[in-house]
Image: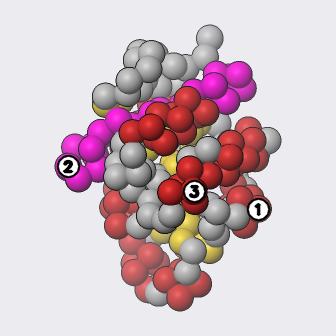
Amino acid sequence: MARVLIVGCGCRGRTLGRALVVRGHAVRGTTRSAVTAAGAEWEALGIEAFVGDPDRVATLAPALEHVSVACVLLGSATGSPSSLEALHGSRLEMLLTRMIDSTVRGIVYEAAGTVGDLLLAGGAALVRATCHDSLIPYELMGVDPADIDRWLQTALEAVEGVLSGQATERGAISESPGPNTPA
């Protein structure tokens, strides 16, 4: 059993969280809303709600405690172009830095969605470089999140892949497909 953190635990994140709970994992999901976190839905799914905002990386730092795998599911985040650029750029870089100085030993990054291919490719490159340099297994999910069944299966395989050390880039990622678990 592993503790999995889902950053961006919206509808798809909660679907993934529930499937991970069924598989025996402990799941913590982030939400920006204290009202949402206090609702009974998350508890009914077996997901520990954590109030934190990826736009304010320091608010997510306590959520990393005792986490083995972090899933960054922000491929369909909304906001201004500059906020989305920061979310998949400088803020992602800060979050990754915090993750490598924590108990996190695997990262799953949603590299497909409505944000835009250029921003997602940039985020994927940050994850790839940070994890490679830090010898941390990672997964880049290039599956269209609109295909929820395929997306969920891919996300489950991604989590299991980083846990087993058999990580691969899943879906259509434009750069260097293939194994990415550092040697």
Residue type at numbered disc 3: Ser
User: What residue is drawn where x is 59% and y is 34%?
Assistant: 127
User: What residue is drawn where x is 54% and y is 39%?
Assistant: 123
Instruction: Please state the horizontal and vertical placement of residue 65, each as a whole percent of the image.
Output: 72, 56
Is 126 part of what is drawn in magenta?
A: no
Compare residues 104 and 72 and report the one nearer the observer.
72
Which residue matches tag 1?
58
Asked if 123 appears above or below 11 in the picture, the reply is: above
Q: Are marks 2 and 1 in contact (CB under 8 Å)?
A: no
Query: In terms of sequence position, does the residue under pointer 2 or pointer 3 come before the other?
Result: 3
Compare residues 120 and 10 and report the one nearer the observer.
120
| Front tag of 1 and 3 | 3
Which residue matches tag 3?
82
Instruction: Please state the horizontal and vertical placement of residue 23, each as a whole percent of the image.
Output: 38, 51
Residue type at numbered disc 1: Ala
Query: In terms of sequence position, does the residue under pointer 2 or pointer 1 come before the other?
Result: 1
* Structural distance between the alpha carbons of marks 2 and 3: 27 Å
* Structural distance between the alpha carbons of marks 2 and 1: 32 Å
| Front tag of 2 and 3 | 3
Which residue matches tag 2?
147
